[in-house]
Image (cartoon, helix red, strand yellow):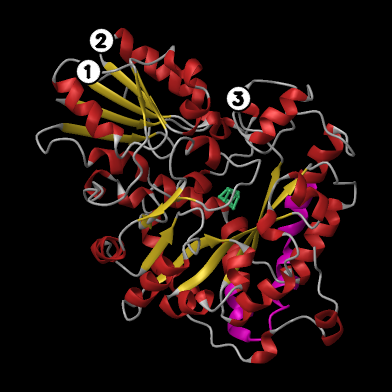
């Protein structure tokens, strides 16, 4: 059987602000995971439109398309095209799970939720010429899943081909997050068996890994055993975790010892009222500066995530957030305009209050205002958001922020990582064009090398330590 698996490009890919490098980071792991359930005799073509031109002139028997909100319209067009040609088309992913009725108009079969249980079921039914219209995931387990078909990934087109996911979901329930909608009707946080995760790591070449898990430290026992097993593997890795998990116990030290060198942290907002509005309880009453200093002390770089446009935000929120990031030596900041994704609690609340302004999913990219704002006008929010990005990544702030570290090595790492990521677009574009992005891995690995920090690294003053920002 000829199988085509497609990740269509997000609508951002057409924006004048599109940064090709941002979409050439990670390969389509979800599709490669599902491909593992196909037969070795199947002829599989996995295409990621972010890094290659789609070939739509082929004649596959089965087409599997992964749908996010901002590639939905493009995914539907591709699906319609293949259906017209007589192929059997499957749609799955976050957006399909949020709006199954919309997606079903463009598919022979849709998948709701995770696919590890339902895709093999579908394949059996398809073989017996009796596939269902809808497959709903209910059993949630990562035990005995076959190894991901990484051979289908064009490694040289990605900066981080060694991305890996060892858990599914997250133990928290933030109102603006897709997670609860995606995992509805079953477990919403579960992990691989530690030995399987370690075996998957062993299979990956080189030193660098990027864990794409929503919350790598979410299950302390699993994470602790994983890091124990990774000791001595000589890996450097990046991942994501919450503030409370950084502050609790010594898991973060174990992660650092195993090779953790940079962490994505959802700070989101400094306002307790905003946190309550978002049901982001895990950040409430947490000392952000203490968490940041703990990471600095361990030599772990920080990618801070911040949301603008929550109801308590005022005109000063942009400057406050950027200044805080620079002062606290946050390595990179990711800013988002609050976006109510369909079927999340945030969307339902806003819909009830009649605050949803558009259902053009292409605009749901966290760069546009799609809802009725409260304290800020939509224009103020958009201008403030654009200003924050420009300001945080100005050379002067990159310089200031880097020099807020004590050790020279940390200063240099911060400077090269942030500057390299944001200020050398033409170099990235050249590497992408020449399909040699993967060649940058040794540089990334050396920037992520260990920093030995002494206790002087803590950058807050004694006075600030006595009066930490508690939110
Ligand atoms: S902590 Fe992150 S992944 Fe978990 S529910 Fe909140 S936003 Fe989603």
Q: Nearer the viewer, mark 3 or mark 1?
A: 3
Counting residues from the start of the chain, the first of labels 1 and 2 encountered is 1
Q: Which mark is residue 59?
A: 1
Q: Position of residue 362 (x, y in %)?
A: 60, 26
Q: Is residue 412 left or right of residue 255?
A: right
Residue 54 in sight from this viewpoint: no
Number of residues whose C-alpha sits closer than 10 Å to that of mark 2, classed few (under 14), some (14–19) or many (20 or more): few
**Disc 3 + disc 2, Cβ < 8 Å:** no
Counting residues from the start of the chain, the first of labels 3 and 1 encountered is 1
Q: Which residues are magenta?
A: 386-413
The answer to whether residue 181 is above or below residue 450 is above
Q: Is residue 411 magenta?
A: yes
The answer to whether residue 398 is above or below residue 449 is above
* Residue topped by disc 3: 361
Q: Main secondary structure of the magenta part?
A: helix
Q: Position of residue 205 (x, y in %)?
A: 27, 64
* Residue topped by disc 2: 86
**Disc 3 + disc 1, Cβ < 8 Å:** no
Does dot 3 land on a helix, a strand or a loop?
Answer: helix
Counting residues from the start of the chain, the first of labels 3 and 2 encountered is 2
């Amino acid at each position: 059987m000829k199988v085509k698996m497609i990740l269509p490009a997000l609508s951002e890919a057409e924006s004048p602000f599109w940064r090709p490098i941002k979409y050439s980071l990670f390969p389509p792991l979800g599709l490669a995971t599902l491909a593992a359930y196909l037969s070795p005799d199947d002829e599989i073509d996995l295409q990621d439109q972010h890094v290659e031109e789609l070939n739509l002139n082929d004649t596959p028997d089965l087409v599997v398309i992964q749908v996010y909100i901002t590639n939905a319209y493009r995914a539907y067009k591709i699906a319609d095209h293949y259906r017209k040609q007589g192929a059997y088309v499957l749609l799955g992913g976050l957006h399909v799970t949020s709006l199954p009725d919309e997606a079903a108009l463009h598919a022979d079969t849709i998948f709701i939720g995770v696919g590890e249980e339902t895709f093999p079921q579908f394949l059996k039914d398809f073989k017996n010429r009796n596939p269902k219209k809808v497959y709903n995931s209910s059993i949630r387990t990562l035990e005995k899943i076959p190894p991901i078909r990484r051979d289908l990934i064009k490694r040289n087109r990605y900066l981080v081909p060694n991305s890996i996911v060892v858990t599914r979901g997250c133990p928290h329930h933030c109102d603006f997050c897709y997670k609860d909608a995606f995992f509805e009707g079953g477990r919403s946080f579960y992990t691989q068996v530690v030995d399987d995760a370690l075996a998957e790591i062993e299979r990956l070449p080189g030193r660098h890994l990027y864990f794409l898990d929503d919350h790598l430290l979410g299950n302390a026992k699993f994470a602790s055993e994983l890091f124990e097993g990774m000791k001595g593997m000589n890996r450097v890795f990046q991942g994501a975790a919450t503030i409370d998990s950084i502050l609790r116990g010594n898991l973060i030290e174990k992660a650092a010892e195993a090779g953790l060198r940079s962490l994505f942290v959802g700070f989101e907002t400094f306002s307790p009222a905003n946190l309550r509005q978002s049901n982001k309880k895990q950040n409430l009453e947490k000392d952000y500066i203490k968490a940041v200093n703990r990471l600095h002390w361990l030599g772990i770089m920080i990618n801070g995530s911040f949301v603008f446009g929550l109801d308590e935000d005022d005109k000063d929120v942009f400057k406050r957030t950027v200044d805080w990031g620079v002062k606290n030596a946050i390595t990179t900041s990711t800013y988002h305009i609050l976006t109510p994704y369909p079927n999340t609690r945030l969307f339902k609340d806003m819909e009830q209050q009649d605050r949803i302004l558009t259902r053009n999913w292409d605009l749901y990219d966290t760069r546009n205002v799609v809802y009725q704002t409260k304290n800020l006008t939509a224009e103020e929010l958009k201008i403030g958001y654009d200003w924050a990005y420009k300001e945080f990544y100005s050379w002067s702030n990159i310089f200031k922020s880097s020099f807020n570290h004590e050790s020279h090595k940390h200063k240099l790492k911060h400077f090269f990582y942030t500057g390299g990521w944001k200020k050398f677009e033409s170099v990235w574009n050249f590497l992408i064009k020449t399909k040699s992005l993967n060649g940058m891995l040794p540089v990334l690995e050396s920037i992520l090398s260990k920093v030995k920090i002494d206790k002087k690294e803590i950058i807050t003053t004694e006075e600030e330590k006595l009066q930490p920002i508690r939110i």
